[in-house]
Amino acid sequence: LWVREIASSAKGSTVVWSSRAVGPVTSPSSAAVVLAGGRTALRNSRGAALAFAAMSSIAPTDDAAPARAASRMLALRRALGVTGRVTAWVCQAVRATPGVPPRCTRRVSLKSRVTVSLPEWMRGAVRVVVVRQGR
């Protein structure tokens, strides 16, 4: 979680971000994990799994440009028994620029399964976040 503060006056406004992440924020309706590869469960503050994440790489085809890196995919699966609306997104685990929050993918709805294609700029470990709304 990153804190953003907007300071305003008659002459204009400016945005300031926290120098580092605040948290972890623990909740029975959310989970986050840092993942560099493999599989893991996203567990809430009570230890119950909300979802499962698996990272995989897809090698470029023979006709692809030789300089192109392998595409990374993140497969998310909703845990059995989880009710309500579940939303997920993926962020860089390490910030590229100090003082600026890490870039993230768009939010996706996790009905049962979803695959997120990670952009090329998202290298190394990623932070996967899952939030459940409702009961």
Image (cartoon, rainbow, N blue to C red):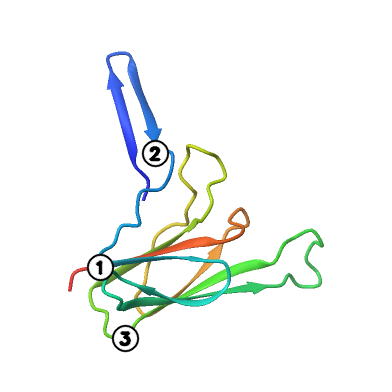
Mark identifier at residue 20: none
Above or below, 121 relative to 83: above
Residue 42 location (% of width, % of height): 39, 73
Quarter holding the C terminus is bottom left
Amino acid under disc 1 = Ser
Above or below, 13 relative to 66: above
Q: Mark 1, residues whose alpha carbon is within 10 Å: few (<14), some, or many (≥20)?
A: many
Above or below, 72 relative to 11: below
The label nearer to you, 2 versus 1, is 2
The label nearer to you, 2 versus 3, is 2
The label nearer to you, 3 versus 1, is 1
Q: Name the one closer to the observer, 122 or 124.
A: 124
Residue 72 location (% of width, % of height): 61, 67
Under circle 3, the secondary element is loop
Under circle 2, the secondary element is loop
Displayed quadrant of residue 117:
bottom right
Displayed quadrant of residue 10:
top left
Rendered residue at 23%/78% (across/down): 83
Q: Name the residue under label 2.
A: 18
Mark identifier at residue 80: 3
Question: Are discs 3 and 1 less than 8 Å apart at CB?
Answer: no
Q: Name the residue under label 1.
A: 29
Q: Name the one closer to the observer, 33 or 74.
A: 33
Nearer-N-terminus badge (3/1): 1
Could you tell me how far apart the alpha carbons at marks 2 and 3 are, in whole angstroms? Answer: 36 Å
Displayed quadrant of residue 30:
bottom left
Could you tell me how far apart the alpha carbons at marks 2 and 1 are, in whole angstroms? Answer: 24 Å
Nearer-N-terminus badge (2/1): 2
- Seen as rendered, the residue at the extreme top is 11
Amino acid under disc 2 = Ser
- Residue 20 lies left or right of residue 71; in this view the side is left
Amino acid under disc 3 = Leu
